[in-house]
Amino acid sequence: MKQRLKIIIWVMVLSLLWGKPTYAEKTIIAVAANFTAPAKKIASAFHQKTGKTVVLSFGSTGKLYAQIIHGAPFSALLAADEKRPELLEKSGLGHSRFTYVQGRLVLLGSKEKLMAGTFNRLAIANPKTAPYGLAARQVLKKMQLYEAVRKKLIFGENIAQTFQFVMTGNAELGFVAASSAKGKGWRVPSHMHAPLNQQAILLKKAYENETAISFLSFLKSKEATSILINYGYSIVTE
């Protein structure tokens, strides 16, 4: 109930800030936290090329989805999974979904420490709202470590906060997105968890919003693809 009230208040604030007169001028894109850095870079490149502005709103995919179904004025969702875009499409709240990247999971810190259990805190994103957190839990279960480390887990609200837990020393180890690990850590083999196919979807409020449509199209461009690969993502051809 508390969480629902927070979402409603947040939506009301956004609606006041981004009312109908300005909605067509600026496009608000909801973006999964793991995609923060590349999204900023792509939005900048998009602005330079087209002169059009997109406003990015970051969070866990689960929380962004909750905000959308409660009326948040987003034009599109760049999720960290396939599940939420598919639900939005089925409920008539969006269409034209596609997989824009496939993410990779990385363990920051020593894999040997993880295996031996010689650590105090292991950070993962909340599996209920963050697909990367769900993938991390799947990896721990695959490694038959989940029950052993369960009491040592600390949960980030999203993958960005999970990364901060490790960077600030609040956790010795952490499962984070490869895009933030910058080549460090143990790159988890993709067969150890469900594919992190990240899908984008155009939302109902923006079916005729040219900026939103152009931005999603730009995500598929060679320029955007080059940025994505540099951040450690794989491109899925559909």
Image: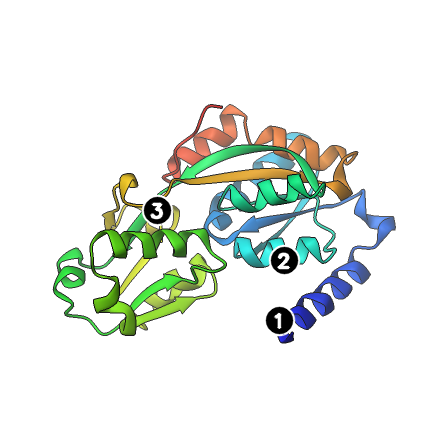
On screen, residue 113 above or below 191: below
Q: Is residue 172 visible?
A: no
Q: Nearer the viewer, mark 1 or mark 3?
A: 1
Secondary structure beneath disc 1? helix
The type of residue carrying mark 2 is Ala
The type of residue carrying mark 3 is Ala
Q: Quadrant of residue 174?
A: bottom left
Q: Is residue 120 left or right of residue 8?
A: left
On screen, residue 204 above or below 18: above
Question: Which residue corresponds to mark 1?
Answer: 3
On screen, residue 176 above or below 42: below
Q: Residue at x 69, y 32 (%)?
A: 213
Relative image position of residue 227 (x, y in whole percent): 45, 35
Q: Is residue 46 left or right of residue 108?
A: right
Mark 2 neighbour class, 10 Å CA radius: few under 14, some 14 to 19, many 20 or more: some
Q: Residue at x 51, y 34 (%)?
A: 100
Secondary structure beneath disc 2? helix
Mark 3 neighbour class, 10 Å CA radius: few under 14, some 14 to 19, many 20 or more: many
User: In 3D space, how far apart are the residues under numbered discs 1 and 3 (Cα atoms)?
Assistant: 30 Å
Q: Is residue 35 left or right of residue 194?
A: right
Labelled pair 1, 2 in contact (Cβ < 8 Å)? yes
Disc sitting over residue 111 in the figure: none
Labelled pair 3, 2 in contact (Cβ < 8 Å)? no
Q: Quadrant of residue 161?
A: bottom left
Secondary structure beneath disc 3? helix
Which numbered disc flags the more N-terminal residue, 1 or 2? 1
Q: Is residue 9 visible?
A: yes
Question: Which residue corresponds to mark 3?
Answer: 178
User: In 3D space, how far apart are the residues under numbered discs 3 and 2 (Cα atoms)?
Assistant: 26 Å
Give the total of numbered labels.
3
Question: Which residue corresponds to mark 2?
Answer: 66
